[in-house]
Amino acid sequence: MFIMPSSPALLLAASTTSQILNALTDNTFADLYRMQPFDWAILIPYFGVLVVLSVYGCHRYEMIRTYYKHRKHIPTESAVKFERLPRVTIQLPLYNERYVVERLLEETLKIEYPRELLQIQVLDDSTDDTHSFTERLVAGHRAAGYPIEYHHRTNRHGFKAGALQEGLKTATGEFVAVFDADFIPPRDFLTRTIQYFADPHVGVVQTRWSYLNRHYNLLTEVEAMLLDGHFILEHGARSGSGLFFNFNGTAGVLRVKMIDDAGGWQHDTLTEDSDLSYRAQLKGWRFVYVPSVDCPSELPVDTYGFQVQQSRWAKGLTQVAIKLLPSILRAKIPLRAKVEAVMHLTPNISYPLMLIITALIWPVTIVRFYMGWMQMVMIDLPLIAAAFWSLTAFYIVAQKELNPKDWKRSIILMPALMAAGVGLTLVNAKAVLEAIFGIQTSFARTPKYAVGEAKTKLQNVKYRRRSGWLPYAELAVGSYFVLMIGYAIDTWNYLAIPFLLLFVSGYFWAGFTTLWQEYQGRMQWQRQRRIEALESAAAE
């Protein structure tokens, strides 16, 4: 006998439960359509890829948990101190940095440290007028009594790693601080970092990056959020819990003895910093992360410059994974450290996997049209929560930790952040595949414009790289997703439209902004040539 519920709430609950059960057991199309081998050949790789992406998504949740559990272990000052300060060498690696080198030198010379214990090396691999300009600047500062010296290589052997290793041959410091050309070291940088090395087991002290042009445009705001996630949560979680983490190649201090013990700077990967970091930590050296010290830097302000930077990091980290993971997995270190190293060094594999998702999503949508909607929700929702919702949680939590008063703005920026991530898919997938198949490429520098928060006309057009085929491919893939939206509308699959719009906006944003910025660059170059021609004619 069936007893009717005695209250509206119970009646509603019973009705909802009945609808869910009916949806889960819906066999409307049972006699009209049966899954074919081709359908399984589409669905199995699609869901296999989603499962892999979900693993990396769950790792982001784990990073959040680990950060909150161990953040109290992140140091704010050294427990022990030197009785006498050690000698320090500051290395400034350069390559065609005409527009930022003067600012870099001026700010570096302001660092507060006993002059007799300091050596500043300008390691210049430039092939343009940066060479002569920088040499004159250094000569002037040296004449004024500053302990600065200029080193110029006639080749770029080993790129940045080669320049740093070459500089060590004449370095007089027991410790080496490294600053890239787009960084502005704070005056108290050394006084707040060098004391950690009083512990003889410390090999690296890494500080947090901050950004001179965070609010320059929407792209720089998104870039800042992406990097904040790395510097707040990833570095915080790994360093606080005693796991391996990486020196970021700049805004940090290294013990020269550690560099030598780990095998020196090596240039067989594009991320020589991560390579050295893991080799050193496998040797037993301890790394210290000090987020209370922030070092301002300049973010790429144009889309393709951002893509070049990210693809270099993606390829380099994958190269480090291929090079070092066998040694890491064989090493006598805790299992948790091995698992974290795998998750740290391999996340960029998600970009080729996203290409597979892109190729399969339309046929999968067609195949799954005959499934009940509830089956789709029950299968897809956990995977989407793991693979994609984790992004939102990760970057919003990072902003809340960094900016507790105005972190809510990051919620508004999340669609742009996710679209920017989509816009990296093609270029980063190419970079990762190059690393996997051993295709060697040169070190692609990120153009620096010496800009701050205020809008300025970009002067260094000559440093911009041509994007080639990339923006056209991005527009083609974006158009593919536009067609998918049309199909979703035709099949009443309206819930899929916001998800598809994210891909449309990401690919179109990357493609259109790159082409527009390159067009503006050409127009600026042509205007400059006309002005020079008129000035030349007037002089004659």
Image (cartoon, helix red, strand yellow):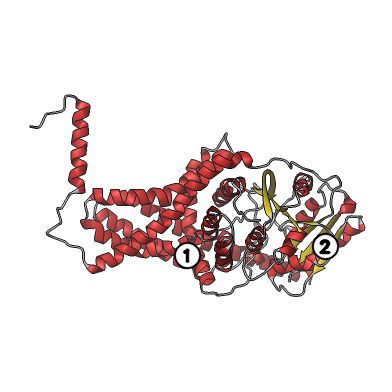
- Measured from the top left, where is residue 279 in percent x and y? 65, 62
Q: Amino acid at mark 1?
A: Leu
* Other-residue count near label 2 (Cα within 10 Å), few / some / many at <14 / 14–19 / ≥20: many
> Residue 257 lies in what quarter of the image?
bottom right
Q: Which mark is residue 171?
A: 2
- In terms of depth relative to the viewer, which is nearer, 288 or 214? 288
Q: For the residue labelled by badge 1, is the local secondary structure a helix, a strand or a loop?
A: helix
Q: Which mark is residue 426?
A: 1
- Measured from the top left, where is residue 445 in percent x and y? 64, 65
Q: Residue at x 11, y 29 (%)?
A: 3
Mark 1 or mark 2, which is nearer the start of the sequence? 2
Q: Nearer the viewer, mark 2 or mark 1?
A: 2
**Residue 389 position (above or below residue 35):** above
- Measured from the top left, where is residue 96 in percent x and y? 71, 66
Q: Residue at x 92, y 55 (%)?
A: 145
Q: Amino acid at mark 2?
A: Ala
**Residue 163 position (above or below residue 457):** below
* Other-residue count near label 1 (Cα within 10 Å), few / some / many at <14 / 14–19 / ≥20: many
> Residue 533 lies in what quarter of the image?
bottom right
- In terms of depth relative to the viewer, which is nearer, 433 or 337? 337
Residues under labels 2 and 1: Cα distance?
41 Å
Q: Residue at x 42, y 61 (%)?
A: 354
